[in-house]
Amino acid sequence: MKDYETTDIRNLCLASHGGSGKTTLAEAMLFNAKATSRLGKVDAGSSVLDYDQDEIERKCSISLAVAHFDWKGKFFNLIDTPGYADFMGDRMAGMRAADSCAILIDVASGLEVGTEMAWQQAERANLPRIIFINKLAKENVNFGEVLEKTLERFGTSVLPLQIPIGSGSSFKGVVDLVAEKAFIYEGGKVREAEIPTDMKASFDSYKEKMIESVAETEDSLTEKYLEKGLSEEEVIAGLKAGVAGGKLFPVLCGDALSNTAVDLFLDAVSNYLPSPKDKPPVKGKAPSQDKEVTRENDPDAPFAALVFKTVVEPHVGELSLVRVFSGTLSAGTEVMNTTKGSTEKISQVFLFTGKERSEVEELRAGSIGALVKLKKTGTGDTLCDKSNPVVLEGIEFPRPVTSMAVVPRTKGDEEKVSSGLTRIADEDPTFSTRYDPELKQTLVSGLGELHLEVSVNRLKRKFGVEIDMVKPKIPYRESIHRTVEVQGKYKKQSGGRGQYGDVWVKFEPLERGSGFDFVNAVVGGAIPSKYVPSVEKGIKEAMQTGVLAACPTVDVRATLYDGTYHSVDSSDLAFKIAGSLAFKKGQDAADPYLLEPVVSVEVVVPEDYMGDVMGDLNSRRGRIQGMESEGTLQKIRATVPLAEMYRYSSQLRSMTQGRGTFTQSFSHYEEVPREIAERIVSETAREREEER
């Protein structure tokens, strides 16, 4: 890697709906820049960037991939991100590291939900955007119609800079509105030509709109335009300023698969999208303070970088992908991790293209590279100069919404499974794993069923263990309806010293969420005070296995008010057993019932799907709490029993053609309807019988 000025760097993220051709475009960019000697194909499994086995088999991107190359004196750091919602976390990580974003639109499919979501995420990240309308070599496509819908959805700041020459089998190039030339692609080569006669009127119309849009971005340009018009240099300068300021979103077109107009796309990125130097200083906070600090995008400024992705390789260890926002990071230096409050020794520094890496001496401001074998550093952490500490803004990843239980296929693999799942969670912040001692299940959580399936495949491939995913158990609870007073008596005589404990306890229901309350109301020494804690312990232990479905019992007050003891045979053990007997008898007599966890659900969907989604939530015993607008979408708030949310992510995507998203969080427990409770109790009894 030769030295590049910060002004010559372009950090570009590719984002869109799955299947729009992001990776194919990236492969064509690499090929045109001579970073690869052949044009990688996703369908053929020869892609440089989709190199993971799951990606090759599924023919789609699952993780973000980075690549670097030189194009006409500009140094590109390219980030190819997944398009499917299950892997949205990597798209958000890629956008955090980039300075601008290319939004792809499949002209055959039109404006799809993943593309709309990518646009919204880029907007929230305040990234300048360029649009590439792809796949113009497909049959029966309509560029004008797709462009019109793009203008309707994303606003009049969307600005065509090219129009296609033909479509389908007759697509052969584009007319560039700025250069006022046609570019014809034949036999893998490009030639400049005059604008086709039959396109002159269309060209003039688009050209006039383009110049007007550029002129409207600045008052000084507006005045020049009205007085004498704008020169090509003024149009280009106005375009660049408008794009950097988020006032203009250029539209280009082509066909990545046939490598048509990809070179012009590279030129446009070079000419119109900002370098790191064009971006404002990056903001952060002083460690342990609420004081804002900034870092200039300058190699001579104090060093500050963000880890935006962690990759776990079984034989290599962890690779940390970093974006250097300021200063210079050199191999052999020691830096501070201000997120964790630790130090890290930088042994080696790499640049990546797919899985291929090349060692370099340093990473300068604006660079994207990789570090190896960092001890305590993870995704979202800040690395910086020890003498100038700063904590950069991290990455806000979506929370997992789907959970499954996992079971090792081979007995004795539990430890290997646990270790492997933990490593996968380190790599993917949208994936989590935990063991639930109550349910006696290992649970994995992610953004959807596909996300979990891919994670399980990685476990097998990277760590050599296989697991099955099963439906997770529901953490039900039990409680009581009525107040009862019962005796718990334990008496055992078998020669020698016996066991004797006798208690009277009143059990009464408490308000939901109260937990357990124990009251000692014994008077007159009916039970020596030293045995009272044992009674409480016995009740608490018995409460962990209720009488209905062996679930923990909650929201109960136990008042110990009487009993008897034996001066010789009484003991802590005897009173503990007496307490547990009293609870079991009391719960049985107090009209016990089941409680189920209820989650708060927020579903965001286009208005067209609201009726279907609300009907589905009602069928899941959900209660609609309210609705509100969120941009062009509607947010439905509801409470739904957790048991009814199994595989909801797949159902929601099916109902909304992938346009719906949701989040859920625990809300409260409430009583299970009697007929459902009876089914749960009988199923639990059958399972316990089978386990014996």
Image: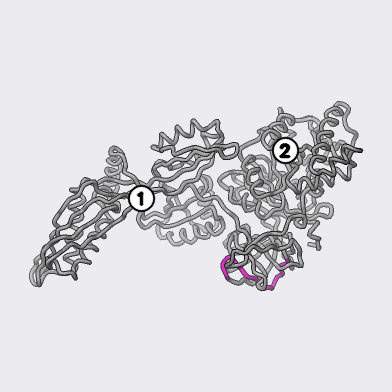
Left or right of 171, for residue 520: left
Q: Is residue 569 magenta?
A: no
Question: What residue appears at the point 71 percent right and 31 percent down from the top-left corner?
Answer: 148
From the viewer's side, name the closer residue of 302 and 428.
Answer: 302
| Residue ranking furthest to the top | 198
Question: In the image, which is nearer the foreground, mark 2 or mark 1?
Answer: 1
Say which label, 2 or 1, has the lower sequence index.
2
**Where does the image place residue 679, in percent across and percent down from the top left?**
29, 40
Q: Say few, some or many: other residues with alpha carbon within 10 Å of mark 2 (under 14 / 14 to 19 / 20 or more).
A: many
Q: Say few, some or many: other residues with alpha carbon within 10 Å of mark 1 (under 14 / 14 to 19 / 20 or more).
A: some
371 is higher (above) or lower (below) than 680: below
Q: Give the amino acid at mark 1.
A: Pro
- Highlighted magenta segment, given as a residue range: 327-341
Q: Is residue 335 magenta?
A: yes
Q: Give the amino acid at mark 2.
A: Asn
Left or right of 563, for residue 629: right
Element on which disc 2 rests: strand
Element on which disc 1 rests: loop
Distance between the alpha carbons at the discs numbered 2 and 1: 49 Å
**Where does the image place residue 209, in percent across and percent down from the top left?**
81, 34
531 is higher (above) or lower (below) than 460: below
Q: Which residue is labeled 1 in the image?
A: 475
**Where does the image place residue 494, in percent across and percent down from the top left?**
9, 67
Question: What residue appears at the point 18 percent right and 69 percent down from the top-left corner?
Answer: 529
**Where does the image place residue 255, in percent across and percent down from the top left?**
75, 38
Question: What residue appears at the point 11 percent right and 70 percent down from the top-left corner?
Answer: 569
From the viewer's side, name the closer residue of 386 and 308.
Answer: 386
Within the image, what quadrant is residue 517 found in? bottom left
Residue 484 at least partly seen: yes
Q: Quadrant of the N terminus?
A: bottom right
Q: Describe the colour scheme in one phrase.
A: one colour
> Residue 134: which disc?
2
